[in-house]
Amino acid sequence: MATRAVMFTIGKFRCFPILKNRIAKFTSSSNLLNTSTFDTGYTRDPSEVFFKENVQALLDRLTGRDYEKVFQNRKLGQRLEPPKYELLTQAEVDQVMVEMEVKLKKKLQMPPLLKEREPVTKILSKDAELQGFDNCKYVFIDISQGINDRKREVVVRDPNGVLRDASWEERQKMCQIYFPLPGRQISMPKMFEETHLQDCLDQGQYQFVLDRACAQFEPDDPDYIRVTRKTYNCIDENNKFSTLRSTRHFGPMVLHLVLCKRMDNLLFHFITSKEVKAAADLVRLFHLVWSDSSPSELDEFQLIENYIQGPAVKKPALELAWQTFLEIEKQRLEALSQQNKASN
Amino acid sequence: MASALPKFTKIAKVIRLNRHGCTNRPFYHIVVQKTKDNQDGPVIEQVGSFDAMPNNKNEKLVALNFERIQYWLSQGAKLSDPVAQLLGLSGFLPNHPRTIIQAWKNRREPPRERKIEAIKGIAPPLDNPKL
């Protein structure tokens, strides 16, 4: 076991695909080692949980609504416009706020967590008489208007005469050539290769990486899942949760951490920044995901305490933080009550 | 069984390849044209493209607007041989006999080498392998 531990800590990512089926066994046996870089995460299908209404509501609440951050001018290569100041009545302001709410919902739409897609294996026809008609394959795409890209017919005729449905990579490449989406390249950008991805994450460019991954890949693409999981794990290790707060990626990140049972850092972050509601929501989400039931306690403090005593992994740190928070709360309440007495 | 005959206009329409691209780099547009018009003349509609040069993944890319091709076929448009072959390869139509014959020819063994004897005293064998 010790030799295996050494192999995993020294081994580079090149080993990752070969050792994939050994990793699950290894992580289950030793939680003490920081297995973040080799963490396969979970085998459960996240889409079962992600699309539930109560889970969506909780994730929405956890994401937050910092209007300043959501609507800030981001340097994405587009022309920036100076802000417009208008004089409005209260009714007009309310109308504008309603429109902004709609825009906000669109900007905060969470990219879904799905499991990896199955490779395409459908063969439409095997024509042995066509073997050798050409020494390259022919890729056909149906460019009829009004078809969803996922349903578009893309077929390949191989030199051995087999007519098959195109693989996911071929399909995405063809759809991007003939029906280009903005922000998406035909081949995978070098940024998403392991070394370059690590560089970007070391620089702390989490939101950029996630936004670009969202534009480049489909949500069930194995590359998308790899890139997003790596980013989420990196944020978790470095405790940089505030970078993603009020962005569309916070919800999927939280759900990923809950499914990995790695939400303790996030809970610690909420407690130390005194966001009790968020901490309670996180614990509720944990119960929803893992036992599919809402916990019986309605009191938030009790809820969090029960979690820290029970399923939490990083108990010492959390207990300390929680005790500190309770003391500060007590002092704050005492100060408030003294103020009230003094004023009365 | 009632079947509407296709409308025969005075000048037939045909779906064929129009060569675009540059010298030594062909790129074909699959278009619907009147038969009498030139290759670079007026086009009724473009219904696809065919890139004859294989890319770095050794693929030849063909785009076909099947919906519109179906429409023009119903209106009595003819198909040129290359277009019919492409449609056969894509599975829209049955395999074209020309594709099958070409495949057979490609698979055929190369012709046996014929050894040419020198004619004694008169001439050595020529270098032309066809003789």
Image (cartoon, rainbow, N blue to C red):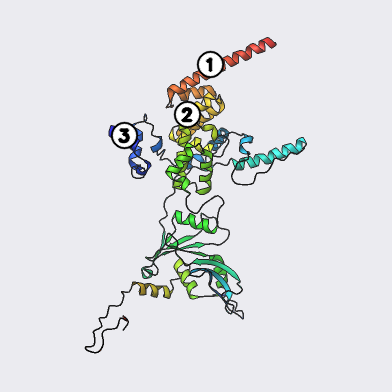
Q: Are marks 3 and 2 in contact (CB under 8 Å)?
A: no
Q: Secondary structure at mark 1?
A: helix
Q: Secondary structure at mark 3?
A: helix
Instruction: Please provide percent x and percent y for residue A301.
Output: 53, 22
> Image height check: is A278 above or below A210?
above
Question: Gap between marks 2 and 1, in whole Å?
Answer: 21 Å
Instruction: Please provide percent x and percent y for residue A150.
Output: 51, 54
> Image height check: is B90 above or below A177?
below
Q: Amino acid at mark 1?
A: Glu
Q: Where, by quadrant of the figure, is residue A90 drawn?
A: top right
- Determine the residue positioned at 40% across, 56% down: A121
Question: Gap between marks 3 and 1, in whole Å?
Answer: 43 Å
| Residue A289 is at least partly visible in this image | no
Q: Quadrant of the N terminus of chain A?
A: top left
Q: Amino acid at mark 2?
A: Asn
Q: Which residue is mark 1?
A: A327
Q: Secondary structure at mark 2?
A: helix
Mark 2 or mark 1, earlier in chain: 2
Q: Which residue is mark 3?
A: A6
* Structural crowding at the residue carrying mark 3, measured as other residues with C-alpha within 10 Å and reported as few (<14), some (14–19) or many (≥20): few
Mark 3 or mark 1, earlier in chain: 3
Q: Where, by quadrant of the figure, is residue B15 drawn?
A: bottom right
Question: Gap between marks 3 and 2, in whole Å?
Answer: 26 Å
Instruction: Please provide percent x and percent y for residue A163.
Output: 42, 63
- Between B20 and A179, the residue placed more toward the observer is B20
Q: Are marks 3 and 1 in contact (CB under 8 Å)?
A: no
Q: Which residue is mark 2?
A: A265
Judge depth for marks 3 and 1 and give the one in front.
Answer: 3
